[in-house]
Amino acid sequence: MKITKVSARVYEWTGPVVHIHANFCTTAGDILTRTPSSIGAYSFLGWLVVEIETDTGLIGIGNAALSPHVTKAVIEHHLAPILIGENPLDIAYLWERMYRQTMPFGRKGSGMAAISAIDLALWDILGKQANLPVFRLLGGALRDKIPVYASRLYAQPLDTLAAEADAYRQQGFSMMKLRFGWGPKDGLEGIQRNLDLVRTVRETVGDSVEIMADAYMGWTLDYAKRMLPQLAPYNLRWLEEPLIADDIAGYAELRALNIIPISGGEHEFTLRGFRDVIEHHAMDIIQFDINRVGGISQAQKIVALAEAFNIAVIPHAGQMHNYHVVMANIACPMAEYFPKVPVEVGNELFWYIFDGEPVAENGYVSLPEDRPGLGLTINPDLSSQFRIT
Ligand SMILES: [Mg+2]
């Protein structure tokens, strides 16, 4: 089998977008006093989809988010020339060639997102060639279905926050994650508002529902150290991304306090990136996203390393590419789940672009046996809602 064509396209949402209010969610930029607090600068209303065509007619589909135009350029200028004419089933070889050839500018960020998208498409081809879903190629079903947690609950007035949390409980979710809205420059009042969010969700769902909370890199070490003891009474399952992704030593310091489990890693990359995380005892829970971390090829290696160190891997975002790895690995006890909502920050765009994403039922997702590869197809009628370039 030979690769004959690599097509990378950016799908930009052109339909209505729900307005995001101030203090919707903290971000890494919030600490800058000259910048207003807003996740608006972090919203991403585009998605990268790559299709790899072969001389047998099989087509593999991969995707990446966050910086689709840059990712597309990396694929077109640097990765496609490596791939054309090669056997798509030589995934390990092609991964190393892409990684080593982009080393001077790749490694992390958009360069690795591009490699990840290609790797997903190659695994999709492998599954289609074998006529098996990808999780079967990774070891098969370790569990009947995957427990998922509802992931939204952005900062908002407490009455609507409570209603949203209650709705997830009624839908059968026994785990859910909220977002903090305030950080270091919001002072003591912001601390109280953050605590109000967590207390409201805890009081709404009771003590038998797991609650997690995400700061999306919007805090500092000092601020997180102040917050942790005040959050302790609410029995959080984990505190997510309190610090910027590069502050591994800071994560280690928070984890050593042993007050609330510390999670992160959705902005970390490759086996070697997570070697550093694990070596520093920086996280209780690793949350890579397979369409950034280096694809399924790297994810499997990281999961094995994490398993050996008793660290759970609960990938960012859910989505098919993550579910296949979760399905086949004992180190992955659950998955994230973004409910489908009207388009807002961009997290939800995959629901509109692809057909085949599993819908949660009673807090679980199941993976179909009858869809070979990753199990996704591109929605055939996107032109009215997306600009495709
Ligand atoms: Mg997160």
Image (cartoon, grey):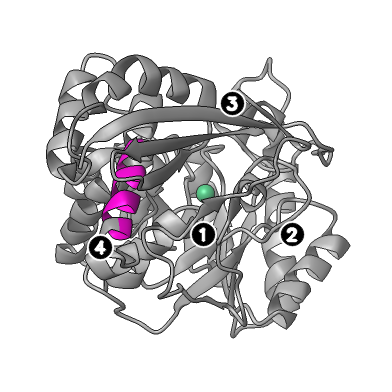
- At mark 2, the secondary structure is helix
Separation of marks 4 and 2 at Cα, in angstroms: 52 Å
Separation of marks 2 and 1 at Cα, in angstroms: 15 Å
Q: Which residue bears the numbered disc 4?
A: 130
Q: Amino acid at mark 3?
A: Gly
Separation of marks 2 and 3 at Cα, in angstroms: 23 Å
Span of residues in magenta: 118-128
Q: Amino acid at mark 1?
A: Pro
Q: Which residue bears the numbered disc 2?
A: 196
Label whose residue precedes the other's in the sequence (2 or 1): 2
Disc 4 residue crowd, few under 14, some 14–19, many 20+, Cα 10 Å:
some
Quarter location, residue 92: top left
Q: Which residue appears farthest toward the front when viewing the image? A: 56
Q: Nearer the viewer, residue 144 or 152?
A: 144
Disc 2 residue crowd, few under 14, some 14–19, many 20+, Cα 10 Å:
some
Label whose residue precedes the other's in the sequence (4 or 1): 4
Point out the image quarter for the C terminus.
Answer: top right
| In this rendering, position of residue 343 left or right of residue 72 | right
Mark 2 CB near ligand 1 (8 Å cut)? no
Q: Which residue bears the numbered disc 1?
A: 229
Disc 1 residue crowd, few under 14, some 14–19, many 20+, Cα 10 Å:
few
Q: How many numbered circles are shown?
A: 4
Mark 1 CB near ligand 1 (8 Å cut)? no
Residue 52 x %, y %:
37, 37
Residue 292 x %, y %:
39, 39
Q: Nearer the viewer, residue 44 or 16?
A: 16
Mark 3 CB near ligand 1 (8 Å cut)? no
Q: Amino acid at mark 2?
A: Asp
Q: Residue at x 23, y 56 (%)?
A: 300
Q: Is residue 19 visible?
A: yes
Residue 141 x %, y %:
31, 78
